[in-house]
Image: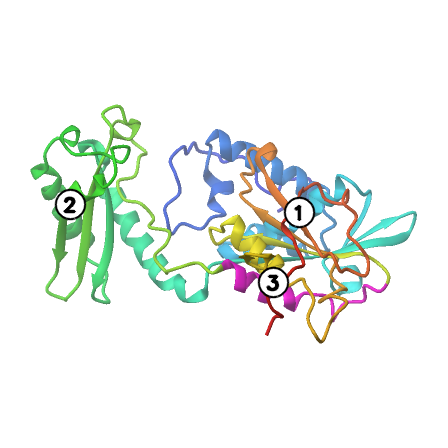
Amino acid sequence: MMAGQPLFPEPASPRVGPLGYVEAPVRWFKTSTRPQAVASRAAVNAWYAEFPDDPGRKLAKRLRSSDGVAHFGALDELYVHHLLRRRFDDVRYEEDGKGPDFRVYERGVCVAAVEVLSLFEPPDWAAPQTRHGRIADQLNKAVKPTAGYFVRFEVIRGQRDPSPKAFARFIENELEQLPPPEQVPHQASPHRAWAHWPRAIYREESGTQIAVTFIPMKPEAPSRTNPDARLASSNAFTGGIVLTAQRLKERVREKAGGRYDITGIPYAVVAGIHDFPDEEEIIAGIFGRTCPQGRDNTGLFGIDSERPDGRYRRLSAVIALTGLPLWDTAAHDVALLPNPHATHPWPLDAIPARNLAPEYENRPAEPAP
């Protein structure tokens, strides 16, 4: 990237179709010309223009990385800097080459510090997710949903990917034999419509077996005529149940401030959460799970026999970033979970956020183990 050039220039060629499931997420910024991508590119370029990157442009390299973890982690840091700059003029990044990520100053005095972490799906999900996405991408290139059905599939046996051509032919043959989709209960139909959806099993001599479900569309579904529509879904929950609460608590605990010089100032950890979180899971990880007395004492914040004045008092708050459509800044969801026992309370105007403090009730059913 040359001086004066935006981080993500406008693509030279139009591309309005979606990214492939295993395509590097950064290609949304590099290649897409959808209106949402244009708006996202403009936002990120503007935010980076005010970012105090180091001479080696370390953040820029991560933002432009084909590695999804590096890319999204850098976006989290960039967005947090943008939020801080809305309130503070002097926001410094990795000051003196040490953490936390950001320190904010007023009249030359440090008044708060922020560390950013990014929470992704468990590492052992990567292989099945990537495999499923790879098969789906190949199928979507070969077969369009013009027959009025979507396809959901699951690899139930075998370590090898199916032959792309053979699997596509199998799907095309099955679609030709299905009844018109109008004759099959669709997704908006009454309860248990899914029980009537057509199914088939694809088999190869290698032992690979794939269970396929054909999901009927509504008669007016735009995917029937959209040349960019995808036949097969990403099946985002391939890996299993997402336990955000425990994983969030463990990651924030690692950043709770013990290794940083944050004496005398409020300190917050901002968590960019990228694993399909339910808000209750986020609240449970920080404030505890619901119980008859309010919330139990299993969250990060609370009291126990060893710390009657409160746990992790150096940590003023956790701030959760979820659902950040970059093309619509008004729809960004930022939630503040303040530590009621913090030595230095977090200033509520430092980062604009929904305050979830009312979710905390320090009436545990029993002390945390």
The three-letter amino acid code for the residue at tag 3 is: Gly
Amino acid marked by disc 1? Pro
Which segment did they paint magenta?
244-263
Residue bearing mark 1: 358
Left or right: residue 5 versus residue 129 is right
For mark 2, does the 10 Å Cα neighbourhood hold few (<14), some (14 to 19), or many (20 or more) residues? some
Residue at x-position 39% and y-position 62%: 125
Task: Check whether the beta carbons of the residues at disc 2 and disc 3 lie within 8 A of each other.
Answer: no
Residue at image position (19%, 56%) is 210
Instruction: Tell me where residue 48 sits by quadrant.
Output: top right
N-terminal of the pair, mark 2 or mark 3, is: 2
- Specify few, some or many for label 1: CA neighbours under 10 Å numbering under 14, 14-19, or 20 or more: few
Residue 181 pos. (x, y %): 16, 32
Residue under pointer 2: 171
How many numbered discs?
A: 3
Mark found first going from the N terminus, 1 or 3 = 3
How many angstroms separate mark 1 from mark 3 (CA)? 15 Å
Query: Residue 247 lies in magenta, yes or no?
Result: yes
In front: label 2 or label 3: 3
Residue where numbered disc 3 is placed: 299
The outermost residue toward the left is 177
* Residue lying at the far front of the rendered structure: 292
Depth check, mark 2 against mark 1: the one in front is: 1
| Amino acid beneath label 2 | Ile
